[in-house]
Image: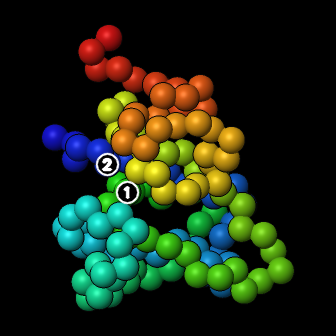
């Protein structure tokens, strides 16, 4: 059964991505810590989770993870850009938390309400 309010993210490499370019890493087991949002008080618990090795991705390689997996990418230390395509899928009932996000610039969405906006189409409705 899916975790209520969680999302699924796919990151697809459009060109080679090496560890020197700041490829994504995951804090293994961090999903077991529960919903933390952007609360920095949870970070000491996250730091106790092992950090995965940085990935080397070829064009078309992809990662997939739930939002509750704490993840990130270090700085790109090369002159080459890190090209990728990100797809995020949220349950239709997922509420907007009010957290600022560059994808929401200009969108009027009420905090605590579902993401009911043309930029966030429903791609699957299990109830038809």
Which residue was labeled with disc 1?
67
Q: Which mark is residue 30?
A: none
Q: Secondary structure at mark 2?
A: loop
Determine whether label 2 and label 1 are within 8 Å by CB: yes
Q: Residues within 10 Å of mark 1 (few under 14, many from 20)?
A: some
Tell me where residue 96 appears, x and y as whole percent: 42, 44
Tell me where residue 33 appears, x and y as whole percent: 20, 70
Quadrant of image for the C terminus: top left
Q: As drawn, which residue projects farthest toward the left?
A: 1
Report the residue at 32% width, 61% height from top.
68
Tell me where residue 26 appears, x and y as whole percent: 40, 73
Disc 2/disc 1 C-alpha distance (Å): 6 Å
Dividing the picture into quadrants, the one containing residue 111 is top left
Vertical comparison of 29 with 89: above or below: below
Which residue was labeled with disc 2?
6
Vertical comparison of 105 with 119: above or below: below
């Amino acid at each position: 059964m899916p975790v209520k309010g969680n999302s699924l993210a796919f990151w697809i490499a459009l060109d080679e991505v090496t560890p020197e370019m700041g490829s994504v890493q995951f804090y293994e087991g961090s999903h077991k810590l529960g919903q933390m949002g952007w609360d920095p008080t949870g970070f000491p618990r996250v730091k106790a989770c092992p950090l995965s090795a940085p990935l080397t991705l070829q064009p078309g390689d992809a990662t997939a993870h739930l939002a509750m997996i704490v993840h990130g990418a270090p700085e790109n230390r090369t002159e080459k850009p890190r090209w990728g395509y990100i797809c995020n899928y949220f349950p239709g009932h997922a509420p907007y938390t009010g957290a600022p996000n560059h994808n929401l610039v200009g969108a009027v969405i009420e905090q605590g309400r579902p993401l009911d906006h043309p930029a966030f189409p429903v791609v699957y409705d299990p109830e038809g």
